[in-house]
Image (cartoon, rainbow, N blue to C red):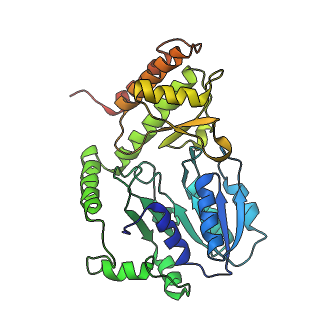
């Protein structure tokens, strides 16, 4: 546990495993993949950037083709869930390709999806997996979590890049004493304990992941019923955030402002090249199907205010059908 935001944990994953001049691959499918690029370049790594168009995922075949001509790659950095585009990269398949084509470490940014997406670190062959408290872990920002494989620890022990506050060996040594090397975020650690209890009460991690998948399907079905386009394909859609195109004929900034001012519903706008083109519907953490139904209902009210042509109630009805179908599959008669 690091007393930091997720970006510091990503930096720790980089600086503890790679030395200046080493070759690394960074897969970027949006703004937060570019974070990894910036971190690696700042420390003088030789970065090979596999960049996809925003809204598209990286496939295993694309990564294999990219890796094959490269040699001596020290690490491959991958964003699991790209918050800026609502893309969920196929981490298991990508990690397998890295294993087959190189000896590189697989280092994964899971900040915006751990707690809401499957994460089989050992089975998938991930070496370092990073997450933060403020997304699907249901907490305020300020606590990050780094999980490290035995293979990665050996690399870290031999690494010569200097670090102090982000030195993972120091955190490992102090963890054995039940402490942290620097001031811990006490309130968030207590909060994390309560989050773990909530996950247990829900039925375990698999049930929490299933809830996020259900909310994703509810949102996507609602938007389809409202004839509003989605940025990403279903195959790679994030379970924690959905990127939605601006409704046709509506000025997006005015629409989002109206939603916030009149209906107290706050959607995030697009980043980078998608600014003004999309809005992002977050459904992660302490969020439930009832919240989705309420949000879609309020969104429909705002669409009516903008004279958008749609069948009132269509979005709510579509989301509700997805919810009822899921309930029918999980609830049995007493």
58 relative to 212 in the view: left or right: right
20 relative to 7 in the view: left or right: right
Residue at point 50% right, 41% down? 241
**Quarter of the image with the C terminus in it:** top left
Residue at point 65% right, 35% down? 277
Residue at point 71% right, 52% down? 52
Q: Nearer the viewer, residue 263 or 3?
A: 263
**Quarter of the image with the N terminus in it:** bottom left
Residue 192 lies, with reference to residue 258, above or below; the image says below
Q: Residue furthest left?
A: 334
Q: Nearer the viewer, residue 101 or 216?
A: 216
Q: How many marks?
A: 0
Q: Nearer the viewer, residue 159 or 149?
A: 159
Rendering quarter of residue 250: top right
Q: Position of residue 12 (x, y in %)?
A: 49, 72
Q: Position of residue 199 (x, y in %)?
A: 29, 49
Rendering quarter of residue 229: top right
Q: Residue furthest right?
A: 69
Q: Position of residue 33 (x, y in %)?
A: 61, 57
Look at the image and tell me whether residue 120 can be seen.
Answer: yes
Look at the image and tell me whether residue 293 can be seen.
Answer: no
Q: Position of residue 107 (x, y in %)?
A: 55, 67
Residue at point 26% right, 76% down? 178
């Amino acid at each position: 546990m690091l007393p930091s935001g997720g970006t510091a944990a990503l930096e720790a994953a980089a600086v503890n495993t790679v030395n200046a001049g080493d070759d690394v691959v960074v897969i970027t499918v949006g703004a937060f993949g570019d974070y990894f690029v910036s971190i690696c370049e700042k420390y003088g790594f030789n970065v090979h950037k596999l960049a996809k168009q925003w809204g598209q995922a990286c496939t295993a075949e694309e990564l294999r083709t990219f890796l094959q001509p490269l040699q001596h790659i020290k690490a491959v950095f991958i964003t699991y869930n790209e918050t800026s585009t609502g893309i969920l990269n196929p981490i298991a398949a990508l990690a397998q390709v890295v294993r087959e084509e190189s000896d590189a470490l697989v280092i994964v940014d899971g900040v915006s999806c751990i707690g809401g997406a499957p994460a089989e670190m050992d089975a998938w062959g991930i070496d370092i997996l990073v997450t933060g408290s403020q997304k699907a872990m249901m907490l305020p920002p300020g606590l990050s979590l780094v999980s490290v494989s035995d293979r990665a620890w050996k690399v870290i022990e031999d690494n010569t890049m200097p670090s102090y506050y982000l030195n993972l060996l120091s955190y490992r040594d102090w963890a054995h004493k039940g402490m942290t090397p620097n001031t811990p975020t006490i309130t968030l650690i207590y909060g994390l304990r309560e989050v773990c209890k909530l996950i247990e009460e829900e039925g375990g991690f698999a049930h929490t992941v299933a809830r996020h998948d259900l909310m994703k399907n509810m949102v996507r079905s609602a938007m389809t019923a409202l004839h509003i386009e989605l940025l990403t394909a279903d195959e790679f859609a994030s379970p924690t955030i959905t990127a939605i195109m601006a409704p046709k004929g509506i000025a997006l900034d005015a629409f989002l402002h109206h939603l916030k001012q009149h209906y107290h519903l706050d959607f995030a706008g697009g980043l980078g090249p998608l600014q003004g083109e999309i809005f992002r519907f977050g459904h992660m953490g302490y969020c439930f199907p009832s919240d989705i139904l309420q949000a879609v209902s309020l969104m429909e009210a705002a669409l009516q205010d903008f004279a958008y042509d749609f069948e009132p109630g269509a979005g709510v009805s579509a989301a509700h059908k997805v919810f009822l179908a899921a309930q029918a599959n999980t609830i049995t008669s007493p």
